[in-house]
Image: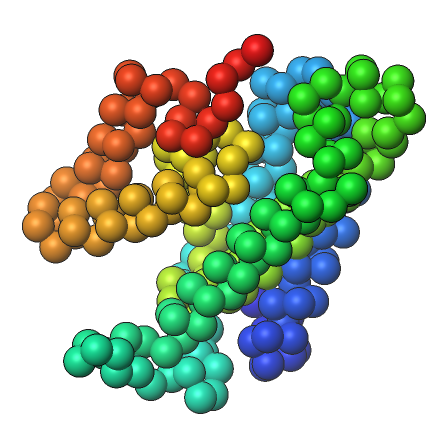
Amino acid sequence: VSILKVIPNLWLAALLGGLAVALLGGLVERFILRKLAGNELGQVLVTLGFAYIIADFCLVVWGGDPIPVPTPDGLDSPIEIGGFMFPAYRLAVVAIALATGVALYLLMERTRLGAMIRAGVDDMQMARAVGIPVSRLFTIVFCLGSALAGAGGILGGPIMSAYPGLDFDMLPLALIVVILGGVGSLIGAFVGSFIIGFVYTFGIALFPQFAYVILFLPMIVVIAFRPRGLFGRQAA
C-alpha cells in the first residue's frame, strides 16, 4: 500500500514490492530460520509469529478498513470471449500466473540450479557432501518465494483490495492447493488451484452459506485415499 501511494503504477509497484519482500524474506531465512534447520515445527511457528507481527504493524499504520487498489488503465473494462464477458484485469492476472508457473517449472526441471535445489530438498547431507551450497540455495529459494508473494499481493489488490489479515485469508486456500496437488509438485499446484477455483466458484453460486466449508471436501478426499496428493511422489 505504501509503495502504491508513492508509485501509482501497479506493475512497477509489484516489482518493487516483490523486491522489498524478497529482502525481508532473505533476512528472516538467513538469521532466524537457518538456526532452526531440521526443526520444521519451529520454523512454521516462527513464520506464523512474524506474520502476526507484520499484520498488527499494518493494522496500526493503515487501519483495519479495506484499502481499494485501482485497476491499471486499459484493463478496467471487460473483454468478450465466445459471447461471454470477462474482466480484462483478471485475465491479465491469470496470464501472469500461468507464465510464472511455466517459468518456475522450467527453472526446477530444466536448469542446473533447479537440479541442485531438488537435490538439496531430497537429501541435504548428500548434497552438501558433493559440494552443493545448500544453505545459499535455500536462501535464494526463500527470497524467490517471498518476492512472488509480495508481487502477488500487490497484483491481487485490484481484485480483493488490501487489508490487514488478507494473508491469513489466503493461507487456507494455499494449504488446500498444496495438499491436493502434492507437496513439491508444480503441476500439482496448477491442477489443485484449478480444482479449488471451480469448487469455490460453484460453491458460492449453489451453496453460498457452505462455500468455505465445501473448499475442504476435495482435501479430505485426497488425504483419505491418496495422502501424498494427486501428483506427489511416493515417500522413499
State the residue in front, 74 or 95: 95
| Residue at x 82% of width, y 29% of height | 134
The answer to whether residue 161 is above or below residue 79 is above
| Residue at x 21% of width, y 53% of height | 201
Tell me where residue 119 appears, x and y as whole percent.
73, 27
State the residue in front, 61 or 125: 125
Q: In terms of image quadrants, where is residue 214?
A: top left
| Residue at x 47% of width, y 27% of height | 232
Q: In terms of image quadrants, where is residue 77?
A: bottom left
The answer to whether residue 152 is above or below residue 176 is below
Tell me where residue 194 appears, x and y as whole percent.
33, 49
Tell me where residue 53 appears, x and y as whole percent.
60, 41
Camera sees residue 33: yes
| Residue at x 29% of width, y 17% of height | 225
Residue 182 placement, left or right of 154: left
Name the image quarter holding the C terminus. Answer: top right
Q: Residue furthest front?
A: 110
State the residue in front, 101 or 161: 101
Camera sees residue 171: no
Tell me where residue 213 appears, x and y as whole percent.
21, 36
Q: Residue furthest right?
A: 131
Residue 142 placement, left or right of 149: right
State the residue in front, 160 or 227: 227
